[in-house]
Amino acid sequence: MSCSPDSPKRSRILLCVLWIVGTITPGLHADLDYPDFLDMTGLTMVGSTTQFGDRVRLTPASIGQVGAVYTTDQIVVGDGFDTTFIYEINPVAGGADGMVFILQNESPTSLYSNGGPLGYDGMFNCVVVEIDTYTNGNFNDPPGPHLSIHGRAGAPNSADELTAGLAVDSTSPNVGGLRTMRVSYAAGWLDVYLDDLTQPRMSVPINLVDHLGSDSAWVGFIGSTGGISETHDVLSWILTIDGGTQFLRGDINDDSSVNLPDAIFALSALFVPGSNPATCLDAADMNDDGNFNLPDAVFLLSALFVPGSTPVPDPVGSCGTDPTDDGIDCDSNNCP
């Protein structure tokens, strides 16, 4: 391709625009809603886990089992999330060893030892909520069934309460049977609810990004049996993501529209000293590569005036949240 002065002016502009504009690879930033598990689209089963009718069965009623189900794609959870799921552990009491709700950034199929380790002991970059049905003295469990939160930033996680336990609740006579759990993360606090979804049983301050090594994680469940068996089923699951500040991609001058003045504003902000800065870098990041620079202004001009140009990444047409985990943010704009 030639961008030389000898090229016809109109063709030269269009060709140069197309040459500079790159491709995009948007990340995942979506809610999950599984009223049942007749359709397992978007989920990956590992180990002993199976689709069991309209539910996910993490372990059968056999000893020495361990299984997991994860989202096939990573989910952006660092800005916050709220999830509720219904699980069933049978028998209600007397079985072993339990199950966990897990966020992990190790691999899409990570799974460790069965029994007391609950399938995650030794896993890097993970935070779990244990639904522990058996007292393992070698892991310093409290007497009887309990709930607990485990995580170790920058180190492999552990099922040992003294090594990685961040919070524990042993007030329930059992945690088995048919139960509803809610887990939420907002403003740096992780809250866990059981059956009463308005009053948390455990609350801990935690920086998920530090523990996961990323804003994103594969999210799911692990079930484990050892020398005593029980079934661990998940019956339904809904997860809502807090994507942070809303913005309109391309509204760089913050006038609630996307047009030529936005490209002029971007070029001025980038290259004219004393110009007004872009207050929402996410909106100015037209090619969604985590930076605000000249290619973004060129991308916008191409999108506005060159037919067939690369589509603008979401959010387009209306305010929305950033679908990509990146290092820039939106300080202020006119979106709600």
Image: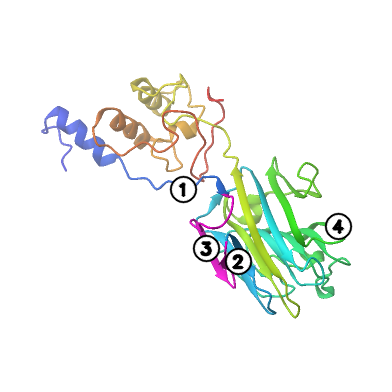
Residue 67 appears at what percent x and percent y?
Answer: 61, 70
Reading the image, the residue beneath label 1 is: 27
The residue located at (79%, 59%) in the rendering is 147
> SS class of the residue under badge 3?
strand
Q: For the magenta stretch, what is the residue range?
A: 34-53
Percent x, y for residue 188? 70, 43
Q: Where does residue 53 sit, x and y in percent of width and height?
A: 57, 63
Q: In terms of secondary structure, where does tag 2 sit?
A: strand
Q: CA distance from mark 2 to mark 1?
A: 23 Å
Sequence-wise, the earlier of marks 1 and 3 is: 1
Q: Residue at x 54, y 66 (%)?
A: 45
At label 1, the amino acid type is Gly
- Check disc 4 and report its element: helix, strand or loop: loop
The quadrant the N terminus occupies is: top left
Of mark 2 and mark 1, the one earlier in the sequence is 1
Instruction: Check disc 2 and give the amino acid type.
Output: Ala
Crowd around label 4: few <14 · some 14–19 · many ≥20 (10 Å): few
The residue located at (52%, 54%) in the rendering is 74
Give the labeled residue for mark 2: 68
Q: Counting residues from the N terminus, which is met first, the one under dot 4 or under dot 1?
A: 1
Q: Is residue 90 magenta?
A: no
Image quadrant where one finds the C terminus: top right
Disc 2: CA contacts within 10 A as few (<14), some (14-19) or many (>=20): many
Which image quadrant for residue 330? Answer: top right
Q: Residues within 10 Å of mark 1 (few under 14, many from 20)?
A: some
* Residue identifier under label 3: 44
Q: Which residue is mark 4?
A: 172
Q: CA distance from mark 4 to mark 3?
A: 31 Å
Image position, residue 98 (x, y; %)? 74, 67
Question: For the residue carrying disc 3, how many other residues have a C-alpha within 10 Å: few (<14), some (14-19), or many (20+)?
Answer: some
- Magenta segment: does it hold 46? yes
Q: Are marks 4 and 2 in contact (CB under 8 Å)?
A: no
